[in-house]
Image: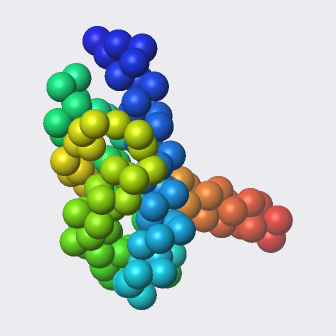
């Protein structure tokens, strides 16, 4: 069970990582394409590690995967920027994990739209 402080830190890291990716990393590399969302951040109780769940909705699977790989490659840069943004003594090591909830939601939306189109015919 997570403490209130742990939950609050996880929420702060979720927002801060998204901010770094969307405002700084996107301009550092041209490999960030599509819509990037940080769906969850899970900071360990000892504050040494953080699992960051990333969802990317790109034009196609290859673009999404390339964006995710670029984010993983720049984990050090993201951690460095977090150290400047968040006034903490230690910034956890970041471990990025793929989260396909956006893709799944998009697929469900398309299926529902196709059902409605079929019903109109």
Relative to 19, 65 lies left or right: left
Residue 65, image quadrant: bottom left
Residue name at image x 30 percent, y 59 percent: 80
Total number of numbered discs in the rendering: 0
Residue 60's image quarter? bottom left
Q: Residue at x 51, y 57 (%)?
A: 19
- Between 70 and 113, the residue placed more toward the observer is 70
Residue 36 image point, x, y percent: 48, 64
- Please say if 53 is above or below 88: below
Figure coloring: rainbow
Residue closest to the far right:
120
Residue 53, image x and y in percent? 34, 48
Which residue ends up furthest to the bottom in the rendered image?
A: 30
Q: Residue at x 74, y 60 (%)?
A: 116
- Residue 48 position, x and y percent, is 17, 36
> In the figure, 83 relative to 68: above or below?
above
Q: Residue at x 38, y 84 (%)?
A: 29
Q: Residue 69 appears in which quarter of the rendering?
A: bottom left
Looking at the rendered image, the quarter that the N terminus falls into is top left
Q: Nearer the viewer, residue 114 or 48?
A: 48
Percent position (x, y) of residue 31? 37, 84
Asked whether the viewer can see residue 61, the reply is no
The answer, for residue 47, to whether it is visible in the render is yes
């Amino acid at each position: 069970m997570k403490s209130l402080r742990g939950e609050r830190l996880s929420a702060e890291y979720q927002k801060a990582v998204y901010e770094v990716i969307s405002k700084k990393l996107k301009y550092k590399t041209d490999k960030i394409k599509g819509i990037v969302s940080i769906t969850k951040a899970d900071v360990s109780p000892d504050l040494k590690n953080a699992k960051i769940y990333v969802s990317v909705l790109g034009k196609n699977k290859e673009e999404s995967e390339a964006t995710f790989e670029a984010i993983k490659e720049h984990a050090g840069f993201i951690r460095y920027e977090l150290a400047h943004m968040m006034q903490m003594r230690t910034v956890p090591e970041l471990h990025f994990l793929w989260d396909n909830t956006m893709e799944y939601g998009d697929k469900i939306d398309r299926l529902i739209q196709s059902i409605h189109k079929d019903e109109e015919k």
